[in-house]
Image: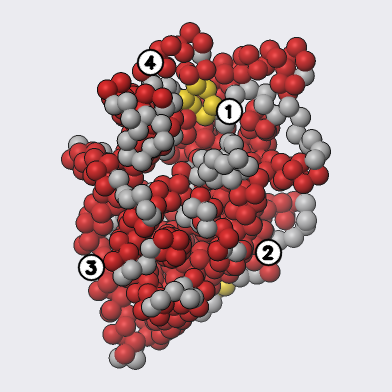
Amino acid sequence: MPTEPASPAPALDDVQLPDNAFRELAPGERYEPVIPDGARAPEVTLRSVLQGIFWSIVFSAAATYIALKLGQGIESAIPISILAVGFSVLAVKVMKSHASSLLENVNVLAIGATSGIVAGGSVFTMPAIYILGLEGRSSFWQIFLVPLLGAVLGVFLLAPFRRYFTRDLHGKLPFPEARATTEILVAGKRGGESAKVLSYSAGLAALFDFVGPAMRGWAEVFSTGAIQALSQFTERTKAVFTMNTSAAVFGLGYIMGIRYASIILAGSMVSFLVLVPLFGWLGRFIPEPILGAVLPLSEMPARQIFFDYVRPIGIGGIFAAGVISILKMSPVIVQATRQAFGEVARLVRGQGAKAEASRTDHSLPMSAVLMGVTAVGLAILAYFRFSVLAGVDGASRLALVSTLMTLVIAFLFASVSAWAIAMISITPISGMTLTTLIVTAVALASLGLSGADGMLQTLLIGGVVCTALSMSGSLVTQYKIGYWLGATPRKIEISNLLGAAVASAATTAVILLMAHVYGFAPSPEHLNPLPAPQPNAMAAVLRGVMGESGAPWFLYAIGAVFAVAAEMCKVSGLAFALGMYLPMDLNSPLVVGAAAGWFVQHSTGEAKLSKARHEKGTLIASGFIAGGALIGVFTALLRFFEDSTGRTLIPDLTALGGFGALLAAWSNWLGLALFAALGIWVYLVSRRARVE
């Protein structure tokens, strides 16, 4: 079909999404993107590439820190889209340049948004190398190659499903994250003001989280165990309520929403207020250590009971929830596989060029995708054979099996991850990665690979798969944004490959920095390590399956029952299980942030005003996440220089004589009060929003 003559792209201020952008199309109706196929608009430019690389580095550092501290990934697409539009306004008003086009901003997003994706995939697995004591067998290049190979694999695995998710299911899937990002990009005039809100909220969060946790201005974690009047009750029952008081966690809860935040907290309540006290009560009748522990239950503090006995129950729940997710998504896997083979069939019949005649449908050809998957597979095979397994008996056979498992598992889970993102913008990466580790560890152990070699090999497989799944979830969002706006799919794919390389390097550097400064598990050098909940969970699984201690299969089974029971009650088993194995202090503040969001959204009965207020609160929450995460990285750098030079760069407020002693005495309550004040401030500021 001949294309219409090229015409100029509409001005940024004039663009609007068509009325059929978010609904199903009537029979014979077609969707025409904002930038039509025949329109000329700058897409990949030098400034869009440089912007994307810059934000990829910044948000990679932020996402890595927040995942290690809170066990949660952060969404970088929305903040980057806001900043991209804000830069466009800046270019016009200050730099006297022309505004960025919609498609330039899509390119910024495609490069920059890989930051949170690669960071999530890498951080959930690679720090386990240090937790397992395998850092002597690793290096910068090893930690760098795993997320890079996984991200590239994720792009190639999802590419055949692009038309299915974007065109065939148009209007049938909500794509909440993609829709929010698209509306931000289209609302060009509003983007400049939104960037200001994001900036000042990030500055406030950075100041809040620096004066509190870093300078010890108040307690980072409020705990009932620190209340003297409750000390005897706490010691007797082992029941402790804790809550992190950082602005970053508050922001995460606001964006997460009350439903999922409540489910996660419910899991924590079962762990810390039911199971931990139950194990403590049983300790009265079991004087000897059990399940390989050093101390008897009666002598363990509540936190140690959680890590030794209750967290494995949460791990079992995550594994079961991951399996349930796969079963639920099996029809999608079948449909997406048929779509992929249909692409191959068209290629064999010589119809590939016709299928990609229009610019807005022009993606990497299927031949390039197949060659890409093959090349990545061969790279993984060579990496496993000549680096990880070099010197191991049967290395070639083990490397081949490991590579095939990596490709098959990543392929099966890629569509699950994409479908979950398209539905609710949340993908069960942790559960699917744990499932991968358990299946892989059992398979490799049956082939004779165990101990340190087996744990490292399994961990690297999990890292590749985890990053591939993260990338597929992000890419499906970008595909949909590009479909709505009229971007070229091939350019989105290539930009993701570029962003993956930049983000992998930045993420690896931050992981190495955090390992040196804080550590990820208690040790004489790191008495207060970063929680790193996912890597610790991964390490626990590997120690059990491939170590000498044996896996706590009974506790895993109990967790599986919890997950199944939650699903039977129509509650997300994955969210509940995540709550069970994450420390309560990371989960309880999520509900506070989510509650603030709920009150903002219900502060008026007028729908448009409610939406405007909630969107402003979302901007503030995004700023909290970015600011808190970035100040965490900055603090780590200062701590690193303190250790290297012996100088004190971060003052300790509790050391300031009588005032410092007063701070130390009231820090627990002061942290709680300031955290509550932060929530009230967000509510009041969000209420000032007006309908445009």
- Which of 346 and 544 lies nearest the eye of the viewer? 544
Which element is circle 3 on? helix
> Could you tell which of marks 4 and 1 lies nearer the N-terminus?
1
Kindly identify the amino acid type of the residue bearing the numbered disc 4: Arg
Q: Can residue 497 be seen in this view?
A: yes
> Could you tell which of marks 3 and 2 lies nearer the N-terminus?
2
- Which of 142 and 495 lies nearest the eye of the viewer? 142
Q: Do the residues labelled 3 and 1 touch (CB within 8 Å)?
A: no
Q: Are marks 3 and 4 in contact (CB under 8 Å)?
A: no
Q: Which residue is drawn at 36% across and 28% down?
A: 297
Residue designated by label 2: 50
Which element is circle 1 on? loop
Q: Can residue 163 be seen in this view?
A: no
Rendered view: 70 above or below 171: above
Q: Nearer the viewer, mark 2 or mark 1?
A: 1
On residue 236, which mark appears? 4
> Could you tell which of marks 3 and 1 lies nearer the N-terminus?
1
Residue designated by label 1: 220
Q: Residue at x 56, y 58 (%)?
A: 135
- Which of 163 and 302 lies nearest the eye of the viewer? 302
Q: In whole angstroms, how far apart are the C-alphas of marks 3 and 4?
A: 54 Å
Q: In whole angstroms, how far apart are the C-alphas of marks 2 and 1?
A: 37 Å
Q: How crowded is mark 2: few (under 14 residues within 10 Å), some or many (20 or more)?
A: some
Kindly identify the amino acid type of the residue bearing the numbered disc 1: Glu
Residue designated by label 3: 334
**Residue 645 location in percent, x, y?**
81, 44
Q: Which of marks 4 and 2 is in front?
A: 4
Q: Are marks 2 and 1 in contact (CB under 8 Å)?
A: no
Q: Do the residues labelled 4 and 1 touch (CB within 8 Å)?
A: no
Q: Which residue is drawn at 56% across and 16% down?
A: 669
| Direction from residue 446 to residue 619 in the image, left or right | right
**Residue 298 location in percent, x, y?**
37, 24
